[in-house]
Image (cartoon, helix red, strand yellow):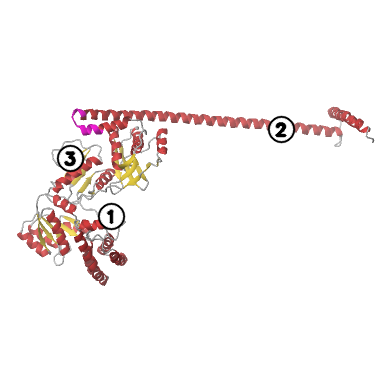
Amino acid sequence: MSALDWPAFVLLLLVAVPLAIYGFCFISRSSLEKAISRLISGQQLSPDDPLLRAIEFQARRNELRAATELAELQDQMSRREQEMTDYHSELQDEALRLETLQAQLEDESRYQSVLRICTQSLARDYVAAVNEGKHDEATQFATHLTALLRAPYSVSEIGSFALLELIDEVLIRLAPIARHQHCEFLVVPLDAGLSNVEINAPRFQDILFHLLVHHLANPLPGKVGLEFSISENHVDLSFVIDSDSDVSFDPVISIELDEALTDNDAWYRNNCLQFPVRPHPGAFASDSGLRALVVADSELERRSITGRLSQLGLEATTDFNSGIVDVCVVADETSESFRALNPYLSESTYVLLLGNRTIHHDPLWIQVGDPVTQDALKVLIQDISNVRDETAHKQILAVDDSQANIQLLEMQLTELGHSVTVARSGTEALAQVEKNNFDLVFMDIQMPDMNGADATRQIRIFNQKLPIIGLTAHATALERDEYNAAGIDDVLIKPVRMENLKSIIHRTEKASARPPLPAAANNRLPIFDLDLSLANANQRIELAAELLDLLIAGLPEDQKGVNDVAGDYTALRKNVHKLHGAVRYCGVPRLNRAIEKLETALKQDDAHQVPLLLNLLNGEIAALIAWRRKNPDVLQSP
């Protein structure tokens, strides 16, 4: 084909192809119509008949088109269903948001109502204080009013504060509505001493205030405990419920409160508020020498009062068992518990009444403010301590077979202004009591020949009223009961400090009640404690050095005496107790603790523990001797 024929061929194709397609369709349609006519007329078609194939082709195409249209309809229905589901979910979310908003508005309304009641009550107290000329009280009420009226979370001040006092300030502001709702907040300090912390005080108080207000917004009467402990970088404040109460603590966390928690790196969950602090080196409570009995039916209230008193340096107990107490703190003076023990209280015992509404004319029965605050307790305890220090001059008999012990006790009692007579055995003590008129006897319990308990039994035959105080390096609860049965009024654990002597001497004035003295615990002890050593020696460094030198010099012989009788528990108990008496005066707490454990195991005849604790004792003796070699000048005078 020549090149000139190509355009004509292309033109022919362009015309012929459409005509062919049209013709095919026309023929197919025409053939289809003919096939249908033949079928209607009853004629048979062969399987290979072009007309039958045309019918099958058209049927498949119609089926395909119908399937495609059905799929499109199903897809449209699926999209519509998803749209309806999304719309329904949005409606539910909106309803929940509206419900939450309504609850927040109701909670805010209750919050404002609580705030208004507190403000009105404090304002009345402020006006009354001003009219009565009580300027200090008026100033305190004005401070609390200012805190209530200012915008929350608007003040920020980081400084050193006593955490317990910060919590008390919040409780004072909430006291009016708490009384109205019959709800009581009880602070339970879990730390042993007075803990000052670096803290953003206004923010902490605002957050705590809002948590408590949201709780008070619902009328849920009962006691709620605020337990707090301090770690290296935060305070944990847990809200606990009294076991006798059906109340629950479940405050509403508003948006404002949640933002305040976040802004101050604090959080609240599982009924616990955690707030950042930095422990500040502050003064820990010194031993006041006072002993307190706590009387309360509520376990939570007992823990709260005991914790507060311990932070003020008191030895607090909730177990009344024929002992001498300086202070009795009573939650309800009408309770059967207090009525039962009241006749046995000493006439010199101060009774602190919490939340009572009855006026008592006994000068030693004192009403404590409601709510109880640490500042108020601190003032009362200080006044009681000052009165105790004014104890009258006494004639005292001091009994001990140890020269060092009797010398130190005589010096302490003399410095307190008392006249002291010394006896070095039970037999000599008995003779002294028969021919002299003493006001008080300090009786060493472990003495050869006639021990302190036997000497006391002999004295009680002819003198029932003379106060006798037992002295020992260690005493179990059972032993205390035995000493009490022998006629010993109370027991002091050696070494006896000045504060303990002051307190026991004051308590023996017209005393008839003697609660037990709980043992203190300390888990982290040094080999040598300089402050303890000086305290035992009445701050006389020469005497402290002499006592330590005597102990170190006699340790090898004492250790040999203990190990030589390791199989004879009776002799071992005697030798260990002798060593215990010497050790208690020298400021060596680790060795002292090892001896205490061994002595307890021996008294319980614990054959499994005794060998182990004897090894521990030998190790502590070796450690003390090695320490002394490395520190020969620790108690030299400057």
Q: Residue furthest left?
A: 435
Label 1 residue SS: loop
User: Residue at position x 16%, y 53% from top?
Assistant: 501
> Residue 50 or 95: which is nearer the viewer?
95
Quarter assignment of residue 183? top left
Q: Name the spot of residue 584 as percent of width and height, x first.
A: 22, 60
Q: Are marks 2 and 1 in contact (CB under 8 Å)?
A: no
- Amino acid on which disc 1 is placed: Ala
Magenta span of residues:
130-140
Q: CA distance from mark 2 to mark 1?
A: 86 Å
- Amino acid on which disc 3 is placed: Ile
Q: Is residue 155 visible?
A: yes
Q: CA distance from mark 2 to mark 3?
A: 95 Å
- Of callouts 2 and 3, the N-terminal one: 2
Looking at the image, residue 315 lies above or below residue 56: below
Q: Which residue is mark 3?
A: 366
Q: Residue furthest right?
A: 2
How busy is the neighbourhood of tag 1: few (under 14 within 10 Å), some, or many (20 plus)? few
Which quadrant would the N terminus be assigned to in this image?
top right
Label 2 residue SS: helix
Mark carried by residue 521 = 1
Looking at the image, residue 125 lies above or below residue 168: above
Quarter assignment of residue 606? bottom left
Q: Which residue is mark 2?
A: 68
Lateral position of residue 490 relative to residue 274, left or right? left
Q: Residue furthest front?
A: 638
- Of callouts 2 and 1, the N-terminal one: 2
* Residue 486 part of the magenta-drawn span: no
How busy is the neighbourhood of tag 2: few (under 14 within 10 Å), some, or many (20 plus)? few
